[in-house]
Image: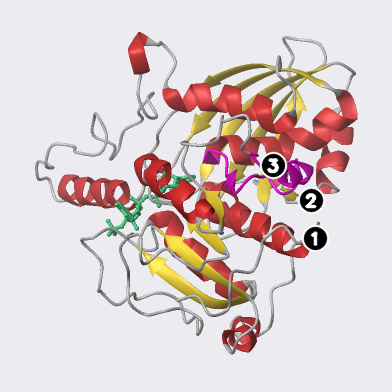
């Protein structure tokens, strides 16, 4: 599907729907890195909402939200309670796995479709794990909860899918360079505070979000080494989620996930072996025609994807497309995306738009609280 075009006045359609038509939407985790972009995108894309209710933790309940100008938005943050979650058509969750584990089924039982950013439901067999450009057909099988993939997986599959359709991908070796906003608001604050201290020749506070200092450093660990595994949970997600989204249970994927001191935008070096030969020229053509992808590939002129250029953009940027001189039928690519947009909030809103278009969201009783 083509995403609905942004309206000239971003709030125009929301204003129109605030009067009575449209969906009643809960945004859970509205104060977070992802939730604040969800609110921004609902406004910018004119999502058909008659009311948008922001939820956060009990710490924030009652506080006014300094969010985007979204007329359908209730100003006051609510906490999750049995009486506050009734009467929603749609709930966009970005409050972590524990909150999703407990509250997503409750919203679904109360009649809402839940689109969840956490890893809690992604690998459940009856939960579709959907990237809007890659496997929108999987939404038909939803049973109340739809999962949004991990950010590094998301931007990778947007680029891989059209190449898989063209030449058949046999093996992927990927190294990520992931930004701190991928860990949330506190991680960005930690990096900035450490950088400020170091630039003023002061000793930074000990790290509390990451296991080591992130400022002026590179960490070859994203998330945890669970149960003695020598791959991190993030790396396992890249393997398992990519296979599920692409419907290729045995696809060979070898990931190394790395955290870098960047505010927003994940970068990935991808080495791709295909079944059929794929020239760099044909690869560029296929990607240039693919939805959600922009090719930026003129290295001589210094044109290639940069995290600072991807931040705030919807498309996944691809460049440095070249043959691997060490292996046949293999290309190298550099893929960069905004982890808070296509890597998270944008995909969730695109999935909501698709579900609304296809009648997969049931309007709750108009009289509901
Ligand atoms: N950041 C990314 O690039 C990205 C990408 C894909 C997926 N995700 C996933 O999205 C989720 C959120 O990530 P984030 O980066 O946005 O984190 P974040 O910046 O730390 O925000 C967390 C949000 O959850 C809220 N929250 C915490 N406990 C809650 C509770 N008991 N009830 C209701 N709300 C609660 C927080 O509210 P308070 O302000 O009140 O604490 C805040 O709004 C995570 O599962 C993450 O893995 C993130």
Mark 1 or 3, nearer chain start: 1
Q: Earlier in the sequence, mark 2 or mark 1?
A: 1
What residue does disc 2 label? 291
- 3D distance between C-alphas at marks 1 and 3: 20 Å
Circle 3 packing at 10 Å, graded few (<14), some (14-19), many (20+), is many
State the residue position of label 3: 318
In this orientation, does residue 104 appear?
A: yes
Q: Disc 3 vs disc 2: which is toward the camera?
A: 2
When the figure is inspected, residue 213 is found, relative to residue 180, above or below; the finding is: above
Relative to 103, say whether 273 is above or below: above
232 on left or right of 134: left
Q: Does the residue labelled 1 lie within 8 Å of ligand 1?
A: no
The spot of residue 222 in percent (x, y) is 39, 29
The question of residue 316 being in magenta is answered with no
* Disc 1: which residue: 2
Name the disc covering residue 118, or none.
Answer: none
**Residue bounds of the magenta highlight:** 128-151
Q: Where is residue 206 in the image (x, y as percent from the top left)?
A: 13, 37
Mark 1 surroundings: few (<14), some (14-19) or many (≥20) residues within 10 A: few
């Amino acid at each position: 599907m083509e995403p609905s075009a942004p309206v000239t006045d971003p709030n125009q359609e929301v204003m129109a729907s605030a009067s009575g038509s449209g969906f009643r939407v809960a945004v859970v985790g509205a104060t977070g890195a992802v939730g604040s972009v969800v609110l921004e995108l609902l406004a910018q894309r004119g999502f058909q909402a008659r009311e948008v209710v922001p939820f956060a933790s009990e710490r924030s309940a009652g506080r006014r939200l300094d969010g985007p100008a979204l007329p359908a938005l209730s100003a006051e943050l609510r906490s999750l309670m049995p009486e506050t979650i009734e009467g929603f058509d749609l709930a966009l969750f970005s409050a972590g796995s524990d909150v999703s584990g407990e509250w997503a089924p409750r919203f679904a039982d109360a009649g809402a479709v839940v689109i969840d950013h956490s890893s809690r439901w992604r690998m459940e067999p009856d939960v579709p794990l959907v990237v809007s450009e890659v496997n929108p057909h999987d939404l038909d099988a939803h049973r109340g909860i739809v999962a949004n993939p991990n950010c590094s997986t998301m931007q990778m599959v947007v680029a891989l899918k059209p190449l898989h359709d063209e030449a058949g991908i046999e093996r992927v070796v990927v190294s990520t360079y992931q930004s701190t906003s991928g860990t949330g608001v506190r991680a960005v604050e930690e990096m900035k505070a450490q950088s400020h201290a170091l630039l003023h020749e002061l000793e930074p506070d000990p790290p509390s979000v990451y296991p080591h200092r992130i400022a002026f450093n590179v960490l070859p660990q994203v998330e945890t080494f669970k149960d003695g595994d020598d791959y991190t949970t993030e790396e396992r997600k890249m393997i398992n989620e990519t296979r599920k989204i692409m419907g290729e249970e045995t696809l060979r994927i070898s990931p190394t996930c790395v955290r870098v001191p960047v505010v927003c935008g994940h970068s990935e070096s991808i080495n791709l072996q295909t079944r059929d030969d794929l020239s760099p020229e044909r690869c560029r053509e296929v990607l240039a025609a693919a939805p959600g992808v922009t090719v930026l590939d003129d290295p001589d002129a210094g044109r290639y994807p940069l995290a600072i250029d991807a931040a705030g953009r919807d498309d996944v940027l691809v460049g440095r497309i070249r043959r691997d001189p060490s292996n046949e039928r293999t290309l190298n690519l550099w893929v960069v995306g905004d982890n808070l947009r296509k890597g998270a909030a944008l995909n969730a809103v695109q999935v909501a738009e698709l579900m609304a278009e296809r009648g997969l969201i049931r309007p709750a009783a108009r009289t509901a609280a």
